[in-house]
Image: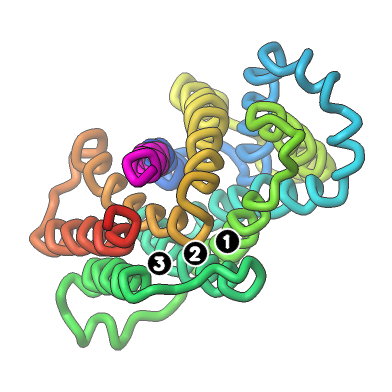
Amino acid sequence: MQALRNNHTLQGIVLAVAATLLWSGNFVISRAVSHDIQPISLAFYRWLTATLIIAPFVWKKFRLEQPIVTANARYLVLVSLTGIALFNTFVYVAGHYTSAINMALIGTTSSPIFATIMAVIFLKEKLNAFRIAGMIICISGILFLISNGSFSKLATFHFSRGDLWILAGAFAFAIYNIQVRKKPLGISAVNFLFVIFGIGTLMLFPFFLKELLLDTPTNWNPVLIGSIIYLGAGTSVIAFLCWNMAIHHLGAGRTVLFGNLIPVFSIFEAVLFLGEKMSTAHIFSSAAVIAGLTIANLKAHR
């Protein structure tokens, strides 16, 4: 029984890491294409692409599970609003005002705190010493990265307009993480994604039309097209499947801690793809985040 439980936990960890690796590119892409496309348009094309990709594989299952989907319509609308329509749209709005690093740092620092508090209040999850210590170490690593090891820089840090947008996105994503734990058993994981992707796309459609008619037109180019495909397939279909399954293996409070890996992965991606240099602060903060995640999950292996 203990071996089975440990294997169950290990699967959850692998799934959570895979999701964060895919999601880390979301912040970089948001910043990179901010001059080519408006934020709501980027979100709309992303979720439309994801819906079209997943539709052929889930259509039969959707028809079979439609009565359960209809019975849980209010729940699915809430999940779609927070995890699909709001979270990533706020990220793309933030990409017009702040750096990719700031987006990854602020989003991954605040979302675990929001989610942990909500998990304790609404799901009655218990906080043990490992969870608390791990979360503190993860946040300390992120703060070290923000300050570049300088307390004076951290003391003068302030939130810009873009930082506030990403903070709002982190709050929406924390709500999503809590709600996913309550997913009805009669709805399969793939069908669940298809439904919330579709609802989220419909929610964005009126705002997409407004942006299309009144704002700067989209500058279509190969990089933008490739970015939308990556967002639709990788950061949407594959990453969300991995993340939702990780939540069922580990619980919402523990899974969300893995979001702290996003800025770590983002740094390495910036080095590999954008030619940016890695500093000592990057190395120390990355090590702190990984150590915090390890400590937060020690309880499951004991």
- Quarter containing the C terminus: bottom left
Q: What residue lies at 20% left-to-right and 60% top-to-bottom?
A: 291
Please report whichever mark, 2 or 1, sits nearer to the chain's N-terminal start. 2
The residue pinned by badge 2 equals 111
- Image x and y of residue 268, in percent: 22, 43
The Cα–Cα distance between marks 2 and 1, rounded to whole angstroms, is 6 Å
Extent of the magenta region? 1-17
Please report whichever mark, 3 or 1, sits nearer to the chain's N-terminal start. 3
- Image x and y of residue 57, in percent: 66, 13
Q: Is residue 6 magenta?
A: yes
The residue pinned by badge 3 equals 109
| Label 2 environment density (alpha carbons within 10 Å; few <14, some 14–19, many ≥20) | many
Q: Is residue 71 above or below residue 298?
A: above
- Image x and y of residue 239, in percent: 49, 35
Residue type, numbered disc 1: Ala
The Cα–Cα distance between marks 3 and 2, rounded to whole angstroms, is 6 Å
Callout 2 touching callout 1 (CB < 8 Å): yes
Callout 3 touching callout 2 (CB < 8 Å): yes
Q: Is residue 157 magenta?
A: no
Q: What residue lies at 84% left-to-right and 20% top-to-bottom?
A: 64
Q: How many marks?
A: 3
Residue type, numbered disc 2: Ser
Dot 3 falls on a residue whose secondary structure is helix
Pick the front one: 248 or 40:
248
Looking at the picture, the colour scheme in use is rainbow
Residue type, numbered disc 3: Thr
Residue placed furthest toward the left:
280
- Image x and y of residue 66, in percent: 87, 28
The residue pinned by badge 1 equals 174
